[in-house]
Image: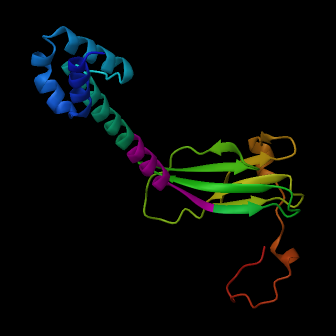
Amino acid sequence: MSPMLFFWSALLKFRSRNEQSSHLAVLETTPFARRARARDLKRRPCIAMTTTKKTLVIIGSAVGVAVLAFVGFVAMFSFSMVSTVMTKRSPDRQHTAKLSRVQGIDVNFRVTVDGKWVYGSPDFAPVPADFREQLIWDTDSQTVVLEVASRRIFGYHVGEQRPLTDTELLKIHLTPFEELRFEGTLPKDVVIR
């Protein structure tokens, strides 16, 4: 290697990239400089980004950030609308039913039994009232009933894994109050059926 070529290649190695690019036009006019530059690029390839590539990267980054922000907002909004009203185990402790309330434009209720979604209610008006929603298990722990404002609106047979028909729903036997052996004092005007 000639001393001149060695000098120019050493000079190119120790200069910063900005200095290299500013002096590139002068240095590449000589044959030994072109060889040194080619050898330097083989050792340390750099990827030159054109203006189009830079623009696409900037646009892609902006769109990616916007999409992530939108997905985060939707997830936060949907999770804040759903609340668990109650989780209730069957009397024999073999099954678990969960009642969730979805508060959006309207009010809806969801029932899951043993982790499986089994019912989504029709819309209720978003009135400022207590819906008195609750899950009730029958005496043999095979059927769970959804009541809203003391009305049975859905029943599910756990053993057969199916919704109940309307006639089956009305015939469900619930544990009478007397069987619960309440030891307190009831208010005087309570009518016992």
Q: Main secondary structure of the magenta part?
A: helix
Examine the rendered structure and indicate whether residue 86 appears above or below residue 71.
below
Q: x%, y% of residue 187? A: 68, 88
Is residue 74 found inside the magenta-colored segment of the image? yes
Q: x%, y% of residue 103? A: 47, 53
**Image side of residue 107 versus residue 5, left or right:** right
- Residue at 83% over, 70% down: 176
- Residue at 20% over, 23% down: 8
- Residue at 84% over, 67% down: 175
Examine the rendered structure and indicate whether residue 45 appears above or below residue 166.
above
Can residue 55 be seen in this snapshot? Answer: no
Q: How is the image coloured?
A: rainbow
**Image side of residue 104 versus residue 157, left or right:** left
Report the quarter where the N terminus lies.
Answer: top left
**Image side of residue 133 versus residue 172, left or right:** left
Give the magenta range: 71-85
Can residue 115 be seen in this snapshot? Answer: yes
Q: x%, y% of residue 111? A: 66, 50
Given residues 58 and 5, the one toward you in this image is 5
Numbered label tally: 0
Given residues 135 and 23, the one toward you in this image is 23
- Residue at 59% over, 59% down: 84
Report the quarter where the C terminus lies.
Answer: bottom right
Q: x%, y% of residue 34? A: 22, 12
